[in-house]
């Protein structure tokens, strides 16, 4: 799955956890002029804009001192949101039974996009139930994974 360089995870995770937050994942996208460094943070009860600002301020200081990203970049700190990105197989486990959308690095059975319900997480793969049936997708093939929000109200609730 799309992962930031390991050194960024190792550098920033202890700082963010010391603040009482969970580092869900890091996206790093380099561009021709500048790069984007996006951190997804969470905590029990959710994340506010003020939480994102606090993390951004603390992380900016660490990044300025350690200088792990070469060149210009934009730092974004965000909550995972309703369409929560999943960065590793362990993050799939709590969402067994939930809908997920996957983008693969290369085609599997002629497709790069899959949407289905997470049935199980195996050692190196995720099992999805799709409209076409059961699909076992290796973690190494997954480029991007996001939960699909469920906006349906329970029966009898308005």
Image: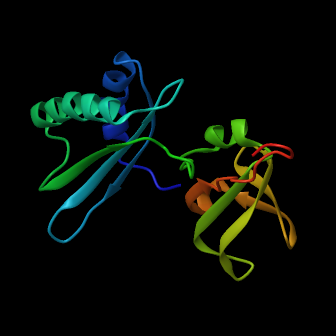
Q: How many marks?
A: 0
Residue at the spot 35% in from the left edge and 16% down from the top edge: 18
Give 4 or 117, whichever is nearer the viewer: 117
Pinpoint residue 142: horizontal percent, then vertical percent: 59, 60
Q: Is residue 110 left or right of residue 144?
A: right
Q: Is residue 49 above or below residue 19?
A: below
Q: Is residue 151 above or below residue 26?
A: below
Q: Is residue 52 left or right of residue 81?
A: left
Colour convention: rainbow
Quadrant in the picture for residue 65: top left
Residue at the spot 75% in from the left edge and 53% down from the top edge: 152
Q: Is residue 3 above or below residue 9?
A: below
Residue at the spot 31% in from the left edge and 23% down from the top edge: 15
**Name of the residue lying farthest toward the right:** 133
**Name of the residue lying farthest toward the front:** 158
Pinpoint residue 71: horizontal percent, then vertical percent: 12, 55
Residue at the spot 71% in from the left edge and 41% down from the top edge: 95
Pinpoint residue 21: horizontal percent, then vertical percent: 42, 24
Give 83 or 113, whichever is nearer the viewer: 83
Pinpoint residue 99: horizontal percent, then vertical percent: 73, 55
């Amino acid at each position: 799955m799309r992962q930031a360089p390991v050194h960024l995870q190792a550098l920033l995770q202890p700082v963010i956890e010391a603040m009482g937050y969970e580092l869900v994942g890091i996206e790093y996208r380099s561009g021709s002029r500048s790069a984007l460094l996006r951190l997804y943070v969470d905590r029990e009860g959710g994340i506010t804009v003020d939480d994102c600002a606090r993390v951004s301020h603390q992380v900016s200081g660490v990044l300025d001192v350690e200088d792990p990203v070469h060149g210009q970049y934009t730092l974004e700190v965000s909550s995972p949101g309703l369409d929560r990105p999943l960065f590793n197989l362990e993050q799939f486990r709590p969402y067994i039974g939930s809908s997920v959308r996957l983008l693969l690095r290369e085609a599997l059975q002629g497709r790069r996009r899959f949407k289905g319900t997470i049935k199980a997480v195996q050692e190196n793969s995720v099992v999805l139930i799709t409209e076409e049936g059961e699909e076992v997708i290796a973690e190494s093939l997954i480029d991007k994974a996001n939960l699909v929000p469920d906006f349906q109200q329970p029966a009898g609730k308005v």
